[in-house]
Image (cartoon, rainbow, N blue to C red):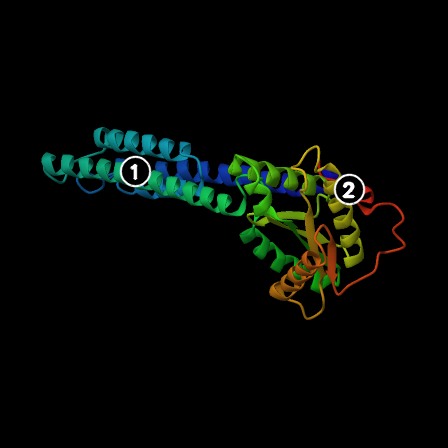
Amino acid sequence: MPALIFSKPVQFRTFQNEHALAFYWLFLCSTSLSIFLFDLYTPLGVAAGTPYVLVIFCSLWFKGNQSTYIAVILSIFLTITGFFLSHGQVAPMDVVLTNRVLALSTILITAFMVLKLKQANHEISSLKTESYIDALTQCKTDRAFVSELITEIKRCKRYKHSLSIAIFDVDHFSKLIHTSKSNKPQSERLIKNLSSEISSSIRNSDQLYRISHDRFAVIFVETDIHEAKEVSNALREKIFKLNHSNFQPGFTVSAGIASLEPDDNRRKIYKRAEKALMQAKANGRNQVSTLPEIKRNDKMLVPAILLRSRSN
């Protein structure tokens, strides 16, 4: 089923990329040939290879450097070839040679600038990716959480769909870490294990974020507050049972859940979930609370965590 769902968009993007590449090479060849013919049939001293700069600048269209290298080599070759094959001469040879040298210098300088711009774009893209992906857990970050929560709220309001968010927080995190001899490795292990357990217990359509050092958030799409609580409770119980074997003894989590209401925005729903989390902490920790408070959903006889399609 996923293959059927995503095959068309992927094919469409591939179609676009292939045609964009073909268009660029067509532009490269036709423009270079036009500049060369103009240079070839113009007396020496009137034209040179400077217009090839346009072709080199157009290589910014593609991320890789190959298109720029090819454009530069072709431009240099045609500029030199045009010098030997051009008809007539209307300026002294030293002027003609100066024009050609300046044209070649302009081509090389432009190529250097284009390559630097591509490198800068790549670095900016990498930094943007790093700001949205947590290095330790490979979860999305708080910046991604804010951006995608806003988008999901708009979508769910437009189509009148359910949306819930859950905030998971490690109980007594600092106390657990201070009891360990190697604080940093221990904390990293706990956080990685927790992110792995949450990720394996939610659907592919749900989104997991690490929003602070020991806090995670999940956006449950198409999910009401009852189902979100069932899933979160099942996850909490699972961690509690496993903490003696896979986690540090005494390692538990608390969770707060809120569901989208008609007048909600990103701040309102998050504050409500955070308030529910504080309530879970105040009630003794290792609990899941919601705002508004709800009772256990009696219709859910099978654990919700088993009814949802898990991530691979």
Q: Name the residue: 41% across, 31% down.
A: 66
Q: Is residue 155 left or right of residue 212?
A: right
User: What residue would you read off at disc 1?
Assistant: 112
Residue 104 horizontal/vertical position (percent): 23, 35
Which element is circle 1 on?
helix
Separation (CA) of disc 2 from disc 1: 51 Å
Give the total of numbered labels. 2
- Which residue is the extreme one toward the bottom? 263
Which quadrant of the rendered structure holds the N terminus? top right
Which element is circle 2 on?
loop
Residue 119 horizontal/vertical position (percent): 38, 39
Residue 117 horizontal/vertical position (percent): 36, 43
Residue 6 horizontal/vertical position (percent): 69, 41
Q: Name the residue: 69% across, 51% down.
A: 254
Q: Name the residue: 76% across, 53% down.
A: 228
Quadrant in the picture for residue 54: top left
User: What residue would you read off at disc 2?
Assistant: 309
Q: Are marks 2 and 1 in contact (CB under 8 Å)?
A: no
Question: How dense is the environment of label 1, judged by Cα within 10 Å: few (below 14), some, or many (20 and up)?
Answer: some
Name the amino acid type tagged 2. Answer: Ser
Quadrant in the picture for residue 244: top right
The front one of 22 and 35 is 22
Question: How dense is the environment of label 2, judged by Cα within 10 Å: few (below 14), some, or many (20 and up)?
Answer: few
Q: Earlier in the sequence, mark 2 or mark 1?
A: 1
The front one of 291 and 76 is 291
- Which residue is the extreme one toward the front? 179
The front one of 145 and 126 is 145
Residue 26 in sight from this viewpoint:
yes
